[in-house]
Amino acid sequence: MGNIMSGRSFNSQSSKTSFFFKSLLPSRCRYSEPIRLPCLAIPSGEPESKKILIIDDDAVILKTLSIKLEGAGYEVVTATDGADAIRAMREEKPDLLLIDVQFPPDIPHGGGVPWDGFILMKWLSAMERSRRIPVIFISGSLAAGFKERALASGALGLFEKPIDHVKLITLIKKGLAGQAVPDTNYQI
């Protein structure tokens, strides 16, 4: 599997859906500059070059979020499942995590154990005990209790897809600056 974005991707070969969408999406590898989108109102002040790890099984979400965040000046690394996320954490040392809450049953779980974004957050947090990495959850649907679980786990917020990118970038900027606190107002 090749890169689908100018950032690095950690992709499992097992996701048929991911492979299908990645084959349809054009590669951004030929661009050396981030794409700037004039219609996206980015909060004032250029961010430092911080690294964000996006963990989602949906190739379209990965591509969309990558474009928006790269356009806002962030370095983006993507992962499609838990194994890819752990590998990315070890190799890339991201400054912030965007984690999908739900993964479909066809995504490998390592040993047949079902997992979700909350379990993945615990694994990734245990890897980085020496530093506190801000986490923001994203979800296609907000099942009962997701908001409470997200905030209780220490996440900064929970965004429902489709994501309001302006609010997301605002929260990311605050989270990276250490100014954000878990807040239900960031749930869309």
Image (spheres, grey):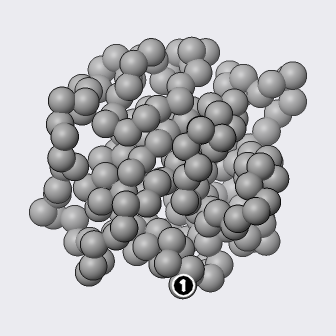
What residue do we see at 79% from left, 39% from top? 115
Classify 59 as above or below 61: above
Most distant residue in the left direction: 38
Q: How many marks?
A: 1
Q: Is residue 106 visible?
A: yes
Q: Quadrant of residue 19?
A: top left
The amino acid pointed to by label 1 is: Gln
Mark 1, secondary structure of its residue: loop
Is 80 positioned to the left or the right of 46 in the image? right
Quadrant in which the N terminus appears? top left
Residue 144, horizontal then vertical, whole percent: 74, 61
CA neighbours of label 1 inside 10 A, class few (<14), some (14 to 19), many (20+): few
Residue 148, horizontal then vertical, whole percent: 75, 70
- Residue sitting nearer the eye, 25 or 78: 78
Classify 86 as above or below 34: above
Q: Is residue 103 visible?
A: no
What residue do we see at 18% from left, 30% from top? 30
What residue do we see at 69% from left, 67% from top? 132
Q: Which residue is mark 1?
A: 179
- Residue sitting nearer the eye, 117 or 6: 6
- Residue sitting nearer the eye, 172 or 91: 91
Is 55 positioned to the left or the right of 60 in the image? right
Q: Quadrant of residue 155?
A: bottom right
What residue do we see at 47% from left, 69% from top? 172
Q: Quadrant of residue 79?
A: top right
Residue 104, horizontal then vertical, whole percent: 66, 31
Residue 93, horizontal then vertical, whole percent: 59, 49
Is 38 positioned to the left or the right of 49 in the image? left
Is 33 positioned to the left or the right of 18 in the image? left
